[in-house]
Image (tube, rainbow, N blue to C red):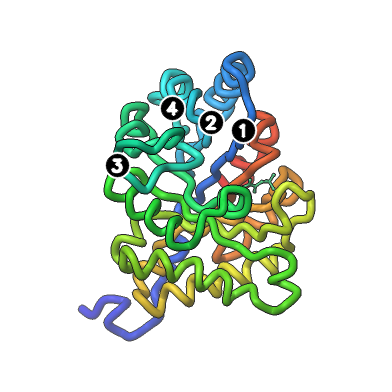
């Protein structure tokens, strides 16, 4: 008997429905042992049933041990906000993948716009960090996005394509697929101005199409998060977009109630 697919009918389930949603909290340079203890305890308790989505928090490096101790065995993973492109050596102030492994980090951010802008990280350096994260078995969450000026100049997709291409050139599409992409329009980060769900979808779809030119399966499977002033009151509409697979949340991730609500909107 012929199977459904042998009739040449379209797939019963679109492959993109198989992608898990992922909600990640970027704490930036905030927190203290006492504050984190309260927040992590609340998150662990509030999210214990959220097993159908991926969840992670990105704390400052000194608190990764605390994340490990308070989140191990929970539904929440943890990661670093930055990683060195070098394995070890005379790089004062940097963090290696081995160090992140010592604290059981699953993820690291690479190329957050604050790193690109304030610390002048170039596309090439971000690509090297992405490659080094993979080499050290840490999942890189690659942040890409345009400034307001670039958007107004009609350069949005050129900018993002260049950011993605630097990484693709270095690691190739198969390795790229081991990471996660976060589309974060710089004009929406920490400003309270979020992209509309349609604006987010437009860029996410364009990113997916760009990746599909390299490999369709990778493009279908890739988690592409949106970041930029995601809050409990706008999360559901953003997550409802077909190419949005979750969020990278800054400010609202510092409030456990808000972060839990955003995770619930994804779950
Ligand atoms: C971020 O820092 O990655 C971010 C998206 O911040 P916010 O949610 O505060 O805009």
Q: CA distance from mark 1 to mark 3?
A: 24 Å
Determine whether the residue tagged by mark 1 lies in a helix, strand or loop. Answer: loop
- Which label number is shown at residue 29? 1
In this rendering, the answer to whether 82 lies above or below 168 is above
Location of mark 4 (residue): 74
Earlier-in-chain disc, 4 versus 1: 1
Q: Residues within 10 Å of mark 3 (few under 14, many from 20)?
A: some
Determine whether the residue tagged by mark 4 lies in a helix, strand or loop. Answer: loop
Location of mark 3 (residue): 87
The image quarter containing residue 69 is top left
Q: Position of residue 48 (x, y in %)?
A: 50, 28
Of the two numbered discs 3 and 2 in the rendering, the one whose residue sits closer to the viewer: 3
Q: Position of residue 33 (x, y in %)?
A: 57, 16
Quadrant of the snapshot with the N terminus: bottom left
Of the two numbered discs 4 and 2 in the rendering, the one whose residue sits closer to the viewer: 2
Residue drawn at (60%, 70%) of the image: 203
Q: Residues within 10 Å of mark 1 (few under 14, many from 20)?
A: few
Earlier-in-chain disc, 3 versus 4: 4
Question: Could you say which is closer to the camera, residue 90 or residue 255?
Answer: 90
Q: Residues within 10 Å of mark 4 (few under 14, many from 20)?
A: some
Location of mark 2 (residue): 60
Earlier-in-chain disc, 1 versus 2: 1
Residue 98 relative to residue 81: left or right:
left
Residue drawn at (76%, 46%) of the image: 233
Residue 10 relative to residue 265: left or right:
left
């Amino acid at each position: 008997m012929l199977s459904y697919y042998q009739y040449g009918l379209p797939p019963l389930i679109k492959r993109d429905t198989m992608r898990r949603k992922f909600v990640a909290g970027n704490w930036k340079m905030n927190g203290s042992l006492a504050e984190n203890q309260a927040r992590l305890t609340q998150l662990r308790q509030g999210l214990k049933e959220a097993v159908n989505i991926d969840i992670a928090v990105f704390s400052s490096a000194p608190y990764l041990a605390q994340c490990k101790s308070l989140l191990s065995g929970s539904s929440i993973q943890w990661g670093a906000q930055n990683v060195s492109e070098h394995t070890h050596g005379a790089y004062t102030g940097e963090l290696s993948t081995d160090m992140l492994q010592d604290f059981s980090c699953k993820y690291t951010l690479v190329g957050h716009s604050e790193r690109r802008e304030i610390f002048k990280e170039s596309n090439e350096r971000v690509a090297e960090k992405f490659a080094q994260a993979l080499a050290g078995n840490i999942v890189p969450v690659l942040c890409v996005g345009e400034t307001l000026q670039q958007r107004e100049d009609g350069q949005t997709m050129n900018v993002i394509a260049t950011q993605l291409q630097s990484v693709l050139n270095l690691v190739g599409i198969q390795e790229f697929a081991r990471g996660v992409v976060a589309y974060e329009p710089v004009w929406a980060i920490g400003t309270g101005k979020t992209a509309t769900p349609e604006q987010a979808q437009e860029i996410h779809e364009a990113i997916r199409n760009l990746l599909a030119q390299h490999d369709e399966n990778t493009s279908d499977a890739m988690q592409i998060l949106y970041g930029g002033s995601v809050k409990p009151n706008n999360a559901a509409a953003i997550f409802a977009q077909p190419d949005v697979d979750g969020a990278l949340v800054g400010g609202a991730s510092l409030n456990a109630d808000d972060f839990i609500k955003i995770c619930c909107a994804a779950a």
